[in-house]
Image (tube, rainbow, N blue to C red):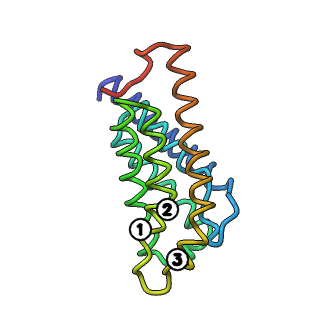
């Protein structure tokens, strides 16, 4: 294994550990699964690439939902984990062109599209959507903005070469 691969593996583990810590910092919501677990996933997408961000974000959601007892059921939380992976992937890809647009689109995806994706599942519907939009949008805005801010500050301080993604 090359030094670069070892560095990426260690940083991925670090971002996943940060997701575990963020999972314990909850944003008030009806489900108890809205937290600061996705900021490290978004950072991984920026520093290591979209795939690593997707992996970190999906594991972050699983950790958060597990800590809350999988209140929406394991299959629904696995679906949400897949969505989180997709959102981080999109964030990482769009950020290559425009970090500002990546922040905006990701807030929309996680804050509005994610709860909308459950509208037609039995037991969810418009009431669930209405209850989750505000906490998810606020948490998404905070998570993605924190990631973008940290990335910008480190990139400015350390230079473009500090970023490991290709």
Alpha-carbon span between mark 1 and mark 3: 10 Å
Residue 24: mark in rendering: none
Q: Earlier in the sequence, mark 1 or mark 3?
A: 3
- The residue under the point 57% across, 30% down is 149
Alpha-carbon span between mark 3 and mark 2: 12 Å
User: Disc 1, disc 2: CB below 8 Å?
Assistant: yes
Q: Earlier in the sequence, mark 3 or mark 2?
A: 2
- Front residue of 159 and 60: 159
**Residue neighbourhood size for the residue with mark 2, other residues' Cα within 10 Å, grouped as few (<14), some (14–19), many (≥20):** many
Q: Quadrant of the C terminus?
A: top left
Q: Position of residue 86 (x, y in %)?
A: 36, 53
- The residue under the point 42% across, 23% down is 163
Q: Which residue is mark 3?
A: 72
- SS state under label 2: helix
Q: Which residue is mark 1?
A: 78
**Residue neighbourhood size for the residue with mark 1, other residues' Cα within 10 Å, grouped as few (<14), some (14–19), many (≥20):** some
Residue 62: mark in rendering: 2
**Residue neighbourhood size for the residue with mark 3, other residues' Cα within 10 Å, grouped as few (<14), some (14–19), many (≥20):** some
Q: Name above or below for residue 96 compared with residue 45.
A: above
Quarter of the view holding residue 83: bottom left
User: Disc 1, disc 3: CB below 8 Å?
Assistant: no
- Front residue of 55 and 119: 119
Q: Earlier in the sequence, mark 1 or mark 2?
A: 2
Which of label 3 and label 2 is nearer to you? 3
Q: Name above or below for residue 160 compared with residue 116.
A: above
Q: Position of residue 75 (x, y in %)?
A: 41, 75
Quarter of the view holding residue 99: top left
């Amino acid at each position: 294994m090359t030094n670069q691969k070892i560095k990426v593996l260690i940083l991925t583990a670090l971002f996943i550990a940060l997701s575990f810590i963020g999972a314990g910092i909850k944003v008030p919501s009806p489900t108890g699964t809205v937290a600061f677990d996705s900021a490290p996933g978004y950072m991984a997408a920026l520093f290591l690439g979209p795939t690593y961000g997707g992996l970190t974000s999906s594991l972050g959601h699983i950790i958060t939902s597990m800590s809350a007892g999988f209140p929406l059921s394991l299959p629904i939380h696995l679906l949400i984990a897949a969505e989180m992976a997709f959102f981080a992937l999109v964030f990482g890809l769009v950020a290559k062109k425009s970090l500002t647009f990546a922040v905006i689109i990701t807030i929309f995806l996680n804050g509005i599209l994610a709860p909308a994706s459950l509208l037609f599942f039995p037991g969810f519907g418009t009431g669930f959507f209405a209850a989750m939009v505000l906490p998810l949008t606020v948490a998404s805005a905070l998570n993605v903005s924190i990631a973008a801010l940290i990335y910008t500050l480190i990139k400015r301080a350390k230079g473009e070469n500090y970023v490991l993604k290709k």
